[in-house]
Amino acid sequence: MLVSERLKRLLKLVPGERRFGFYRFLPFFFVLGGAMEWFMINVRIGKETFYDVYRRKQSERQYEARMEKGE
C-alpha cells in the first residue's frame, strides 16, 4: 500500500488532471517512443544496431522464399 500511495501522489503532481484527465500523460509516451526509436537506430550493441539485424533477417526471409519458389 505504501508504494501505491506514493505512486498516486507522484501522478497527481502532473498538471492538467481536470482538463485532460488520463491523457495528460500522452506527451511522456511520445517522448519515450521517440527515445526508443533513436536508441534502436543509432546505438550499436556489438557491431550491429536493431535495424541492421532487422534488415538482415528480412533479406534472409526473402531469399528463402525465392529459393522455395524456384525449386
Image (tube, rainbow, N blue to C red):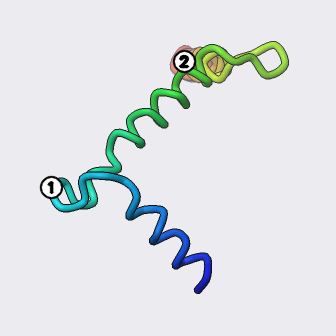
Query: Which image quarter holds the C terminus?
Result: top right
Q: In the rendered image, which quarter is residue 17 located in?
A: bottom left
Position of 35 relative to 9 (above/below)? above
Q: Which residue is mark 1?
A: 19
Query: Which image quarter holds the N terminus?
Result: bottom right
Which residue lies at the image location 54% right of the left edge and 18% below the top edge? Answer: 62
Q: In the rendered image, which quarter is residue 40 located in?
A: top right
Task: Depth check: give the residue in front, 23 or 67.
Answer: 23
Q: In the rendered image, which quarter is residue 57 located in?
A: top right
Q: How many marks?
A: 2
Which residue lies at the image location 46% right of the left edge and 27% below the top edge? Answer: 34
How many angstroms separate mark 2 from mark 1 (CA)? Answer: 50 Å
Position of 36 relative to 25 (above/below)? above
Q: Secondary structure at mark 1?
A: helix
Give the x, y percent position of residue 9: 46, 69
Which residue lies at the image location 54% right of the left edge and 15% below the top edge? Answer: 66
Image depth: mark 2 or mark 1 in front: 1
Judge the density around disc 1: few (<14), some (14-19), many (≥20) Cα neighbours within 10 Å.
few
Mark identifier at residue 43: none
Give the x, y percent position of residue 36: 55, 31
Q: Is residue 54 left or right of residue 12?
A: right
Q: Is residue 35 left or right of residue 46?
A: left
Three-letter amino acid code at the position of disc 2 = Gln
Q: Which residue is mark 2?
A: 62
Q: Secondary structure at mark 2?
A: helix
Judge the density around disc 2: few (<14), some (14-19), many (≥20) Cα neighbours within 10 Å.
few
Three-letter amino acid code at the position of disc 1 = Arg
- Circles 2 and 1: CB atoms closer than 8 Å: no
Residue 7 visible in image:
yes
